[in-house]
Image (tube, rainbow, N blue to C red):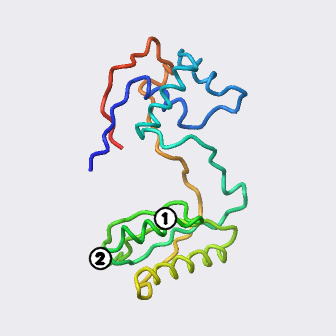
Amino acid sequence: MDYSVDYSELDRAIIVATQGGLPLVARPYHQIAGQLQISPELLMQRMTQMQDRGVIRRIGVVPNHYALGYRANGMSVWDVPDEMIDLLGERIGSLPFVSHCYRRPRHLPQWRYNLFAMVHGKTREEVEVQVASIAALLTQLQGEPVRAHQVLYSTRILKKTGLRLAEKNRAKNRVKNAPTESTQPITA
C-alpha cells in the first residue's frame, strides 16, 4: 500500500514549526505565522488542507501521563492466529485503556508474539487487570484460550517523542514568499 502524499515547502515548514507542540501563548497560530512570515489565515488554511489530506491526523492536547500518576506502562504482547489478527487488533485497539495496538512479525522460534497492545496504569496491578480484560476478549473472539502472552514493562524513558521532521536548514526557521503549488513526495 502506497501512503505517499505530496506537500509543499511551506507545508513542511509548518510541520517543523508545530511538531513539538503549539506555543503556550494567547494566540499560538499568530506566533507561528509570524515566525514563518505568513498570515495566520494562510497558516490555518494550510493546516486544514493537510488535515483533510491525512498529512496531519489531528490537533489536540497530549497529556503527560507520568505527571498524572500513570507510571506502570506495559506493552502486552500476544500470540494470536495470523488469520484473525486484523479483527483481533481492531477490537483490542478500540479498548479505552489501550493507547496503541500493532501487528508485528513473529521471529520464530525466539519470538512468537504478533499482536502488541500498550496499556498504562498507576500501578502494575491496574495494568494486570487491563491485560486480563484483553485476554478475556481475545478468548471470546477466538473461541479458544489465549495461546501465550507477556507484559513488557517500561523501566526508564530514554526518549519519548513522535515522528519529527528535521529542519532543512536550522539557521533559517522561516519561509519567505513560500510557494503554494510546488510539491515533493513524502512517504509516511
Instruction: Determine the image quadrant of residue 9.
Output: top left
Task: Determine the secondary structure under disc 2.
Answer: loop
From the viewer's perspective, tell me whether residue 128 is left or right of residue 172.
right
The residue identified by callout 1 is 93
Q: Which residue is mark 2?
A: 108
Instruction: Please tell me whether mark 2 or mark 1 is closer to you in this view.
Output: 1
The one of 175 and 141 positioned closer to us in this rendering: 141
Give the camera-side residue of 185 and 47: 47
Identify which amino acid the numbered label 2 is placed on.
Leu
31 lies above or below 131:
above
The C terminus appears in which quarter of the rendering? top left
**Distance from the alpha carbon under mark 2 to that under mark 1:** 25 Å
Residue lying furthest left in this view? Answer: 1
Q: Of the numbered discs in the image, which one, if any, rests on residue 75?
A: none
Coordinates of residue 76 in the picture (x, y in percent): 50, 72
Residue name at image x 66 percent, y 74 percent: 126
Say which element carries label 1: helix
Residue 5, x across and y down, in percent: 33, 36
Query: How many neighbours does mark 2 have within 10 angstroms: few (below 14), some (14-19), or many (20 or more)?
Result: few
Taking the spot 50% from the left edge, 32% from the top edge, the residue there is 48
Which three-letter amino acid code belongs to the residue tagged 1? Gly
Sequence-first tag of 2 and 1: 1
In the rendered view, tell whether residue 88 sits above or below residue 68: below
Looking at the image, residue 106 lies above or below residue 42 = below
